[in-house]
Amino acid sequence: MNKSDLKLIIVIILIAIIILFMVAIFNNNSNKKALIYYDNDLVLTIDLTEKEKKEYFVDGYNGVVKIITEDGKIKVDEEESPLHLCSKQGFIDKTYETIVCLPNKIVIKIVSSKTNDLDTILR
Amino acid sequence: MEIKKISRIAMLLALSVVLNILESFMPLFNGIIPGFKLGLANIVILLVIYIYSFKDALLISLLRVFLVGILRTGLFSMSFFFSLGGAIISVIVMYLAKKFTKLSIIGVSIMGSISHTLGQIIVAIIFYNINMVYYMAWALILALPTGILVGYLTKEIKKTLDLSIKW
């Protein structure tokens, strides 16, 4: 390892910290919604402001995908896939966080209405 | 291409496919960071960039993606395009890093590791419209230990091979 390798490592760590910082700034808890896509089509929108536990069922490519929301967080509870990566990922609760179930072609995104406003202004 | 080179490239290709399949049996940090892998197949690609040329590395990388696609994930599936994007961009970036910067083999390996994830994220954004900014930060941090490991292994392997094989 030489000097330029070390410089590269430092730059990478700085960029990562900046990204995490920006995500923390843009994350806001008002009006959070979870959007669930199957094969790029929006199939379900869940309001994440409710505190109580709720269960949802979405049809995935390999079968039914069970989704649980609780206390403003959302996770995939049960699904049919070889590695079960998306159910092992557990709860997500920040805007810009995603759960991707490649075998089931399901994508879960969290958005908030405030983020959408910002997007339109920037455009 | 002379026969000696063809057979060596075929052997390296087989090695990269085996490493690729092998590491899919050992998921690390399973669930915390989805899809995180060591990138052992990159040892072969890195070695080829240093020993042979950019063209050969790109060839092996593309053939590897197709072969793993046929054998495991399914050709032209969603994960196939993710691997394809990652593979092409990482070979190009590693070649440029080797040619135009003072980075050692470890630094080049880190660049390859990062650009592989970056390629996948670009594919995710372009074709599937998935926002993965949040994922990128963790991918960058995790690319460091795996990139250093792969780079170090490649350096040692190259040292040993240089003694015994005349390329």
Image: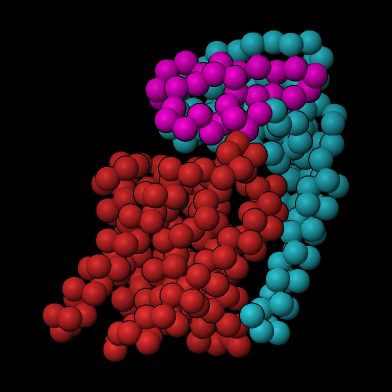
Q: Is residue A79 magenta?
A: yes
Give the quarter of the figure containing the C terminus of chain B. Answer: bottom left
* Viewer-proximal residue among A47 and A51: A51
- Colour red, chain: B
Q: Is residue A108 above or below residue B23?
A: above
- Colour cyan, chain: A
Q: Is residue B159 visible?
A: yes
Q: Is residue B93 visible?
A: no
Which residue is pictured at 38% across the width and 56% down the height? Answer: B19
Q: How many marks?
A: 0
Query: In x, y percent, where is residue A91?
Result: 70, 28
Q: Is residue A21 above or below residue B35?
A: below
**Figure quadrant of residue B20:** bottom left
Give the quarter of the figure containing the N terminus of chain B. Answer: bottom left
Query: What colour scheme does the image use?
Result: by chain
Which residue is pictured at 70% across the width and 71% down the height? Answer: A9
Q: Is residue B81 magenta?
A: no
Query: In x, y percent, where is residue A107?
Result: 55, 32
Query: In x, y percent, where is residue A78?
Result: 54, 18
